[in-house]
DNA sequence: GGGTTATGTTCGGCATTACAAAACCGGAAT
DNA sequence: ATTCCGGTTTTGTAATGCCGAACATAACCC
């Protein structure tokens, strides 16, 4: 009990049963679409059936869960639809994103998404699926890794190095694929290239076979609000097309910036010598 | 304590602190977009500041609330975005609705919505706003009154009379405006007219100055899945246009029905004599 | 069809812990 | 500088959430 009094202190003002209830919601969310039974909930929550039952009943009575037959299985209720809609309305200029994404998807034929920055992390708030048959299971509200996603790197590329190091320090650079950048200096190089290009590239760094291209957009004080991105399957895209996609994404990010009456910051070119010879790499 | 042991029994398996937490979420949702402070929460929850604080901290730590400065105000967190998105994906054929609504909005210039039936109540699951500057504050996940909304009446019109009476008996027919139907027989007449027309009309019955036109759609077993509707301001719509809107809505509802591989039920014409002379009213 | 297993639901008691009140703190306004 | 007001922390106590075990009910299988 002496090990980490800090965590203990942080927990002091948390209501345990509510924590459990929230965890229950998460479990059901992850277990979609078939729902979970009381027994399965109890096992996963590491609690007794009676407790899981009481929690589920409470959520049920308030519309946060619904009961799908047969064999009482709990599924997320429509109440979350309302709350989700409310949240998306609270996002500043929330209805600006979709038209831009629609246009970007039409131009590229790819699924496009918009993320806003939450302490450096991209949180996706809007999505327009492409016409392809392959569907990426990308949920709104999802936080992606800053170092292993195009949107994340686009956001990081607008931040001073100290902030990048702080954010990376907080959660490390866990490896997702063999292409994932796991060293801070390499990441910083990548961010510098991103600044020069105007868009970031996730080349199978988050998931095998998937690429992502993103560009940041800004508010009036030149602060990065978030990033928009397109996602596709690596195999059927020649590299010249990647460049084209990149410019399209960057163009549409600029449209968003102007919608916000925003302004992109002027580039602070690095003096890092390792970077200097990358200047012309853009046109490769 | 002897008054209603039934309610007491139903409450027995509810977790009080979780109930409170959910109520807290509702309060914050209703108080949007500026959020609430701990003190305001405590007052509205009729609890002490410390309790409200603990609840809010718990939700905060899990991303269900966010802290908007200044003077710590709590606002709904982006976690709800994820859950809302998940729920909307769980709706069968969830991505079928939007294209149809887009088309309907283009054809009518009005805001159009789709609702699914939950025990006779329409719950709105998708929305496409019209080009007008006036915005209706219609939230997804919102349950409208069955007797005082076009979508509700469209759904009721597909149900046998006994079901309609049961549903109305459960919550009564509360008056919203002076046009609201508050008598069951009148409602039944209206439903019969709806069946003959092929679409339902809410003529300022839910809110003054607002009209709504809806039509039901069906699944393969001829059961009503829900209804789609258009909403507009009464004043600038001539009655012949209402008819045109009605047919457009009904047409698009049929499109949805066919997307579900569904089939509309054959009309069971009533023998109610009061209705007989309404048959030709359609062409008024 | 009866026995068997796996569930969902109900109950009672103990220990936990969520709660309220009050003290503490820090910033804004006077 | 002082007061006020709201947010945070503390602490004791009573409420209540939790568990285990009993009960009910449905699915399953010889």
Image (cartoon, coloured by chain):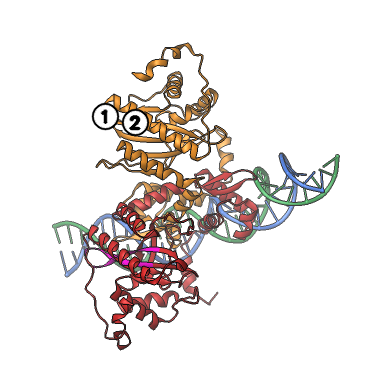
Chain colours: A orange, B red, C blue, D green
* 1 and 2 marks in contact (CB < 8 Å): yes
The reply, left or right, for residue B64 in relation to residue A70 is right
Q: Which residue is mark 2?
A: A245
Of callouts 1 and 2, which one flags the residue occurring earlier in the amino acid sequence? 1
Q: Position of residue C27 (x, y in %)?
A: 71, 40
Q: Position of residue B41 (x, y in %)?
A: 61, 55
Q: Nearer the viewer, residue B54 or B124?
A: B124
Quarter placement of the C terminus of chain B: bottom left
Q: Which residue is mark 1?
A: A237
Quarter placement of the N terminus of chain B: bottom right
Residue at figure coordinates x 41%, y 51% from the top left: B84
Q: Quadrant of residue A128?
A: top left
Please state the extent of the stretch shown in magenta in the rendering. Answer: B213-230
Residue at figure coordinates x 41%, y 67% from the top left: B212
Look at the picture and state if C3 lies above or below B191: above
Distance in Å between CA atoms under marks 1 and 2: 10 Å
The reply, left or right, for residue B49 in relation to residue B247 is right
Residue at figure coordinates x 53%, y 38% from the top left: A261
Q: Quadrant of residue A37?
A: bottom left
Q: Secondary structure at mark 1?
A: loop
Q: Nearer the viewer, residue A204 or A218?
A: A218
* Predominant secondary structure, magenta span: strand
Residue B111 magenta-drawn? no
Q: Position of residue A266 (x, y in %)?
A: 53, 25
- What chain letter is assigned to the residue under label 2? A
Q: Is residue A204 visible?
A: no
Residue at figure coordinates x 31%, y 56% from the top left: B100
Q: Quadrant of residue B200?
A: bottom left
């Amino acid at each position: 009990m002496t090990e980490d009094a800090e965590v203990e202190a942080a927990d002091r003002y948390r209501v345990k049963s509510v924590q459990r209830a929230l965890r229950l919601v998460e479990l059901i969310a992850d277990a979609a679409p078939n729902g979970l039974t009381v027994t399965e909930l109890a096992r996963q929550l590491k609690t007794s059936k009676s407790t899981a039952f009481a929690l589920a009943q409470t959520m049920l009575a308030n519309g946060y869960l619904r009961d799908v037959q047969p064999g009482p299985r709990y599924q997320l209720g429509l109440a979350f639809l309302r709350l989700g809609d409310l949240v998306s309305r609270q996002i500043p200029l929330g209805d600006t994103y979709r038209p831009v994404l629609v246009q970007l998807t039409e131009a590229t034929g790819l699924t496009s998404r918009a993320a806003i920055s939450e302490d450096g992390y991209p949180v996706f708030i809007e999505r327009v699926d492409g016409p392809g048959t392959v569907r990426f299971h990308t949920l709104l509200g999802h936080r992606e890794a800053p170092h292993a996603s195009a949107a994340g790197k686009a956001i990081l590329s607008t931040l001073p190095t100290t902030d990048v190091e702080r954010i990376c320090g907080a959660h490390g650079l866990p490896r997702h694929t063999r292409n994932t950048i796991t060293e801070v200096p390499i990441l910083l190089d990548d961010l510098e290239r991103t600044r020069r290009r105007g868009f970031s590239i996730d080349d199978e760094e988050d998931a095998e076979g998937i690429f992502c291209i993103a560009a940041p957009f800004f508010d009036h004080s030149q602060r990065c609000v978030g990033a928009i991105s397109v996602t596709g399957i690596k195999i059927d895209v020649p590299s010249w097309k990647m460049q084209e996609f990149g410019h399209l994404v960057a163009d549409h990010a600029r449209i968003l910036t102007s919608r916000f009456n925003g302004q992109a910051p002027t580039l602070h070119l690095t003096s890092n010598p390792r970077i200097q010879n990358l200047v012309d790499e853009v046109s490769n």
